[in-house]
Image (spheres, rainbow, N blue to C red):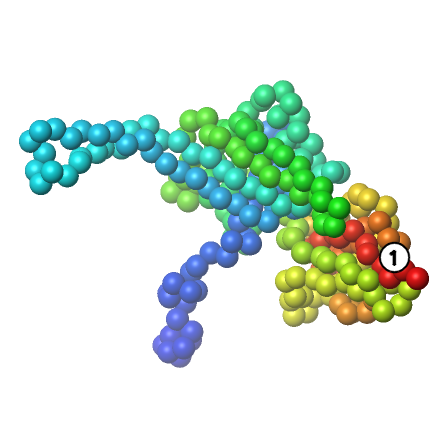
């Protein structure tokens, strides 16, 4: 029997079929509608769906309980993460926000390469935050115009998937003073997956993110623990790459190096 009759590897269990949040990406189409861009640097995603309630209670309602029916439905999406100034996805979002234009969005499962939801929405909130001791971040609220289509129930052809830097998973990178003058100690979360490796670069902000699966063999290799020589106030970017030196995950921090 397959898998020893599922005695210990039961792929029908909830655990085996659960969806990891890190695999779900919020994407938008560019102005031509021909390219789907996953929003760069995203860390969290909330899909809100609600309906108005209409009370239909009358004097003869049994038991003294209120009675209601569902009214008009609405949806919105909240998203936030690390802000990448040079990424096209944020350029498209900024232009749509400034012009008051709607955007065509799509939520995809980046692991299975299948669409989950799609719809037309307007940007109602798009703040940027730049703390002195952390990375620049963004928050994004999109409110739906019409239906949020469930693409798992009503799949489309073609089922366009995102490409480019936005498909990178996000690493949280922290820089603190090292033991040696001019060095910084860097910490990365989550930890590296088996078979992968770290590379890094430093320089003036903002450092450009590599594209998903972009070749980063020319970057400096890092063992995940050695101190890095860098200039205070610059940025250090850590990239987790596969064995073929293709970028999978990335994160950036403002350098805090030890001074005299």
Which residue does the image show at 75% across and 52% down from the upper left? 253
| Residue 153: quadrant of the picture | top left
Q: Which residue is mark 1?
A: 230
> Residue 183's spot in the image, x, y percent?
87, 63
Around disc 1, counting alpha carbons within 10 Å, would you say few (fewer than 14), some (14 to 19), or many (20 or more)? some
Could you tell me which residue is drawn at 67 percent across and 43 percent down? Answer: 137
Residue 27, quarter of picture: top right
> Is residue 162 something one can see in this rendering?
no
| Outermost top residue | 99
Q: Is residue 87 left or right of residue 27?
A: right
> In this figure, what is the number of numbered marks?
1
Q: Is residue 135 visible?
A: yes
Seen from the viewer's position, the closer of residues 150 and 2 is 150
> Who is closer to the viewer here, 21 or 136?
136
- Determine the residue positioned at 49% across, 30% down: 143
Q: Residue furthest right?
A: 260
Specify whether 138 is left or right of 201: left
- 81, above or below 229, in the image: above
Q: Quadrant of the C terminus?
A: bottom right
The correct choice, above or below, for 44 with respect to 260 in the image is above
Left or right position of 199 against 24: right
User: In the rendering, at what x and y percent does residue 157 appear?
Assistant: 49, 38
């Amino acid at each position: 029997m397959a898998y020893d009759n599922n005695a210990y590897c039961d792929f029908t269990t909830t655990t085996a079929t659960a969806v990891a949040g890190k695999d779900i990406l919020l994407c938008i189409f560019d102005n031509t509608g021909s390219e789907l861009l996953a929003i760069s640097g995203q860390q969290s995603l909330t899909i809100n769906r609600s309906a108005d309630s209409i009370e239909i209670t009358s004097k003869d309602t049994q038991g003294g309980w209120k009675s209601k029916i569902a009214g008009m439905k609405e949806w919105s999406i909240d998203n936030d993460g690390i802000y990448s100034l040079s990424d096209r996805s944020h350029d498209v979002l900024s232009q749509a926000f400034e012009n008051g234009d709607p955007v065509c969005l799509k939520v995809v499962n980046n692991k299975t390469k299948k669409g989950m939801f799609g719809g037309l929405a307007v940007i109602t909130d798009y703040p940027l935050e730049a703390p002195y001791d952390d990375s620049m971040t963004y928050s994004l609220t999109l409110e739906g115009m019409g239906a949020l289509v469930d693409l798992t129930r009503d799949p489309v052809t073609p089922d366009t998937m995102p490409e480019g830097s936005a498909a990178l998973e996000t690493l949280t990178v922290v820089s603190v003073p090292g033991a040696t003058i001019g060095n910084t100690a860097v910490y990365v979360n989550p930890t590296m997956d088996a078979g992968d490796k770290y590379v890094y670069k430093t320089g003036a902000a903002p450092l450009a993110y590599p594209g998903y699966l972009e070749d980063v063999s020319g970057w400096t290799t890092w063992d995940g623990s050695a101190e890095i020589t860098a200039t205070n106030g610059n940025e250090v970017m850590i990239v987790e790459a596969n064995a073929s030196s293709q970028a999978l995950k990335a994160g950036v921090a403002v350098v805090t190096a030890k001074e005299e």
